Amino acid sequence: MKPVTVFTGALAMAAGSLAAAQERPLSLPAQVVLGSDSELGQQLPLARDRLSGTQLQPQTLGANLSEPLQRLPGIVALNRENYAQDLQVSSRGFGARAQFGVRGVRLIQDGIPLTMPDGQGQPALFDLDSLARVEVLRGPLSSLYGNASGGIIQGFTGQAPFYPTLDNRTVFGPDGLRRSRLRYGGQHGNLNIHANVARLETDGYRDHSDTRRDTGNLRLGWDIDDASSLTLLVNSLYQPGTQDPLGLTAEQLRTDRRQAPPQARQFDTRKSVTHNQAGINYQRRLANDDRITLMVYGGERDVQQYLAFPGGGQFAGGGVIELDRRFGGGEIGWERNTQAFDLPVELAAGLTYDYQGEDRRGFVNERGIKGGLQRDEFNRVDSQDVYFISTWTLAPRWTMTAGLRHSRVEFESDDDYFIDGSDDSGKVLFERTNPALGLSFQWTPALNLYAAIGRGFETPTAQELAYRPEGPGLNFGLSPARSLNSEVGLKLRQRDTTFSAAVFHTRVEDEIVTGPNQQLTGRQTFANAARSTRRGLELALEQRFARDFSAYAAYTYLDARFDRYADGARDFSGNRLPGVPRHSLFAEVAWQPDSGFSTALEAQGLGERFANDSNQASAAGYAIFNWRAAYRRQWGGLELEPFVRIDNLGDKQYIGALIINGPGERFYEPAPERQWLAGIGLSYEWR
């Protein structure tokens, strides 16, 4: 189903609704307790960053979550220049190994999860065109969000303008790059509407990377009465036939960094995705000032992917993968402001249920044409959670946050492919209770100190369970990763200065890593490393100066290593975790006078990253500089904003992303040299 079809249906459903809209952050009780409220967030014992305004779209393409996230400490967000595999996003090293989608970091928009029940998320589903702010949480308390929460990225859609407003934003760049967005917002009687559609097209920086992506998003706000509100969200993504240029070996990179390896054309590697999702969030404040939140969501995701090998041997499972997924779930939450033991306390509790059912079939890849059936099964994931979170004011300057979350995640597979002579059906249950505790001290009105500790839990994703080393069927021997996280930090907020610092330590048992290749096929499987450790420091400083100048800098030091990990005869103990840079930096100097003109100079840098567990292949560290400028002019209800951007001013050659332990040592995904973007925004408001 295409985005326009979903959009038309959703608008038709909403047309008969009459109610008053109200600006209210759409969030579950857990999100409110853990920092969605800006005032409370300063006092809570966690690392929290907030992006809003021009920070979300600083004269960029506006299509990739990596654009705003790359400025935050603790977060590494990389554009792979490969829309068939999405972005690479990691938080304190969690998620750095992902070869597809985002894992280890939970994604949420307007209280609706964009991370599936198995722990894998798709950042392309974020509606960047309508977000008013993005909040990123890191540290021990993020485990209270459930499975695979090494960090939390949550987006909040903005309230539509009171007066009807239509705007268009079109961006052009090299290699046939074009993105155009049409957005409408306004309040009509009692209905608040925020809707947009967008199309992205590019030939790609590298060969064999043509992309077209259509998105559509709708938000309807409705105040039922003074005590209750209802919000409907619809999101749609249609991405047909996106070419996959694969990774390059070191030799191929030296020969031609823009090429695709021969396997890409030989097997016509590509991916098609259709994703439609809708969610409803209902909130009601009761007579005793309790608040009840009910969230229900559901959707469908269809994927067809052509891989770089035939997949026709015994147990191979096919080189063409077709996934037909249906998913949904809900959450009911309760929160109260009250007193306990004569102390002010905020309480929140809730129950969640998430379901994912997926028809998975594999076919032979006959040089880019779908061949005979090699795999046929139905896989399901059931996830149930119960949580309790409390924030206590122990004294005027002391605050304690404590919580507990119990997660139960079951994977089950029904095998319908018996030609190989075996029934590979089976199931496995993962269950874990994770506590977290934090203490915060407000030393001065501007300075807050905190410490926190908590346990985390990360199940294998359905993709990581999909293949086992010794034959067909799911790899039910793969265990979840378990972590113990601790952190101390400080937050300073004055009129012209904002500063934060955090020191953290994380120990992970049974970390999920790339395992031995499957027998007879050479396909990658996944295994558990015995123990790994992450130690690090995060710093962020924002300073405003006279004459409309401002500066911002964020730095992360992260030492991530295997403590104990052996793969057969190879011992990787003491090696650094691949894909995790020891140093990362973002800095910016900006000037924004009242004339409507704005400009900024950015600096970005990453330290050396290893490409495999043996640390024998790596990508060198780099530092690049970017420049941007815009001019905004308004005539009555008409507003015009042309802008320009140049990335990599020094025309440096560097590696944008790595495919960790990539097959055939195809580890490297090169970033473009000097690139330009030019765009214009045009909007009109009817008064």
Image (spheres, helix red, strand yellow):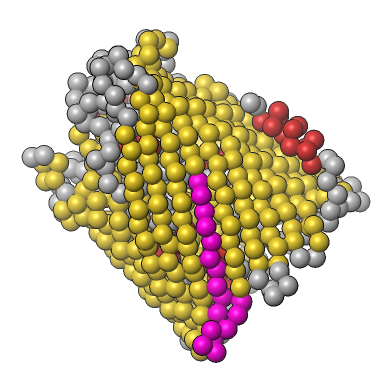
Residue depicted at 43% across the width and 36% down the height: 380
Q: Is residue 111 visible?
A: yes
Q: Nearer the viewer, residue 564 or 577?
A: 564
Residue 526 at what x, y percent from top left?
A: 26, 38
Q: Considering only vertical position in the picture, is 82 above or below 566?
A: above
In the image, the segment drawn in magenta is: 337-354
Residue depicted at 76% across the width and 65% down the height: 227
Quadrant position of the N terminus in the picture: top right
Residue 640 at what x, y percent from top left?
A: 78, 45
Q: Nearer the viewer, residue 86 or 616?
A: 86
Residue 685 at what x, y percent from top left?
A: 85, 48
Q: Is residue 51 visible?
A: no
Residue depicted at 31% across the width and 34% down the height: 426
Q: Considering only vertical position in the picture, is 29 above or below 315?
A: below
Q: Nearer the viewer, residue 552 or 394?
A: 394
In the figure, residue 653 lies in which quadrant?
Answer: top left
Residue depicted at 71% across the width and 67% down the height: 285
Residue 327 at what x, y percent from top left?
A: 53, 38
